[in-house]
Image (cartoon, rainbow, N blue to C red):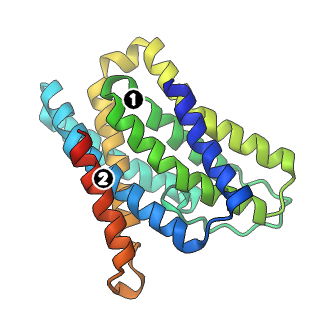
Amino acid sequence: MTYLLLIASVLLGVFLVLFLKPSQKTVRLLLAFSGAYLLSVAILHLLPEVYTDSSDNNIIGICILSGVILQSVLESFSKGAEHGHIHIHTNGKTFPRLLFISLCVHAFSEGLPIHHSGENLLWAIIVHKIPIAIILTIFLVNSNFSKKTIGIFLSVFALMSPLGVLLSNKIIFFELYSSEITALIIGIFFHISTIILFESSENHNFNLHKFLAIITGILLTIFTL
């Protein structure tokens, strides 16, 4: 079921673009909600878990900081796609390989701790993937890539998180270092979610709708833990 839900989250994003054509405002609200939900799960669920399971808190802290740095590096290639902004100009002929590789690495890494961290993390990733899939699909369609290219891109992207879950179940390395890997992912989530939340306000003006989306994401996490 975990594999199907992760794939379905990407397919839902694609479906929304192709058939419902969500407005930019709607996508921004989804991003704000997903960022708040992601950050809340990281703070309320994942952080206590990794510090409880690990015997070396310093290593956990280093792994979290490493996750922040890793995501910064990935975003230098993906141009911000993980938090809702793709700053790449293409004529539909040059395939954005670095964007593709970066997003796949990011999606794969997200799947690694799901086996050990349970449903809270799973739903956080699903909520995060839907608006990202929407933005990615809009980018690919507007870039005039062929339907085949778009289909391959999105299919591989959809399969990367399930692949991370599968390998974490099969390879002993991921079992032995599950706390450190989860800490690394926490750092990635911190980087992504804070950027989403900080960028959610235009010209530093108070936006009631986005504020409510953020509060909803936080409250949903609190009441479902």
Residue 5 appearing in the image:
yes
Q: Position of residue 107 (x, y in %)?
A: 52, 40
Q: Which mark is residue 86?
A: none
Badge 2, how many Cα within 10 Å: few under 14, some, many 20+?
many
Give the residue type that dot 2 points to: Leu
Q: Which of marks 1 and 2 is nearer the N terminus?
A: 2
Q: Please report the residue visible at 47 percent of the width from the left and 12 percent of the height from the top.
A: 170
Residue 96 horizontal side relative to residue 79, left or right: right
Q: Distance between the residues labelled 1 and 2?
A: 16 Å
Type of the residue with mark 1:
Ile
- Rendering coords of residue 193 (x, y %): 36, 57
Vertical side of 142 occupied by 193: above or below: above
Element marked by disc 2: helix
Who is closer to the viewer here, 63 or 142? 142
Q: What residue is pinned by disc 1? A: 114
x and y, in percent, of residue 13 in the image: 61, 51
Q: What element carries label 1?
A: helix
7, above or below 95, in the image: above
In the picture shown, does residue 120 fall above or below 148? above
| Label number found at residue 39 | 2
Task: Residue at 33%, 39% (x, y): give it.
Answer: 184
**Quarter holding residue 210:** bottom left
Q: Residues within 10 Å of mark 1 (few under 14, many from 20)?
A: many
Instruction: Tell whether 73 sits left or right of 119.
Output: right
Residue at image coords 15%, 37%? 58
- Residue 209 x, y percent position in the rendering: 38, 74
Q: Quadrant of the C terminus?
A: top left
